[in-house]
Image: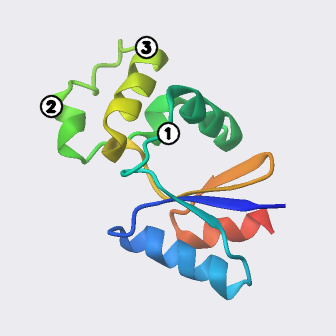
Amino acid sequence: MGVTIYHNPRCSKSRQTLQLLREKGVEPEIVEYLKTPPSKEEIEMLLSLLGMVPRELLRKKEAPYSKRGLDNERLSDAALIAAMHSDPLLIERPIVVKGKKAVLGRPPENVLGLF
């Protein structure tokens, strides 16, 4: 079964997670999601696999979060997903997917639960 990592090479946790996968003998498909943003449907699928709601996947410390007013609790899930799609920097990373399961690699050791 294939493994996919939604990866940002500039993020230390993402790099550590990728290294941990490789140390376990796993060579994942790498999706550099800042270069190739996931569609709204892909984000919905990732949220489902992660068992999260959109607000949990948002990077709240990034400038676009406050600039876009995403801290407004009245925003719908669809609005938050649209924001992550249009500005993927808002998506927490890394996300590792194996089959019908996904985990957030924060901390990187979280991915070990997939194996």
Q: Residue at x 28, y 27 (%)?
A: 71
Q: Residue at x 68, y 51 (%)?
A: 102
Write down the quadrant of residue 25 in the picture: bottom right
Q: Earlier in the sequence, mark 2 or mark 3?
A: 2
- In the image, farthest residue toward the bottom: 23
Q: Look at the picture and state if 34 lies above or below 14.
A: above
- How many angstroms separate mark 3 from mark 1 (CA)? 19 Å
Q: Where the N terminus falls, by quadrant?
A: bottom right
Q: Earlier in the sequence, mark 1 or mark 2?
A: 1
Q: Earlier in the sequence, mark 3 or mark 1?
A: 1
Find residue 67 and name its label: 2
In the rendered structure, the answer to whether residue 95 lies left or right of residue 13 reads right
- How many angstroms separate mark 2 from mark 3 (CA)? 17 Å
Q: Residue 110 in the image: x percent, y percent?
A: 63, 65
* Number of numbered tags placed on the structure image: 3
Q: Where the C terminus falls, by quadrant?
A: bottom right
Q: Residue 3 in the image: x percent, y percent?
A: 71, 62
* Element assignment for label 3: loop
Q: Residue at x 41, y 32 (%)?
A: 85
Q: Residue at x 39, y 17 (%)?
A: 79
Q: Residue 12 in the image: x percent, y percent?
A: 38, 74
User: Dot 1 corresponds to which residue?
Assistant: 38
**The disc labelled 1 sits on which kind of residue?**
Pro
Q: Residue 77 in the image: x percent, y percent?
A: 48, 19
**The disc labelled 2 sits on which kind of residue?**
Lys
Q: Look at the picture and state if 103 lies above or below 114.
A: above
Residue 86 can be seen, yes or no = yes
Residue closest to the eye, 3 or 95: 3
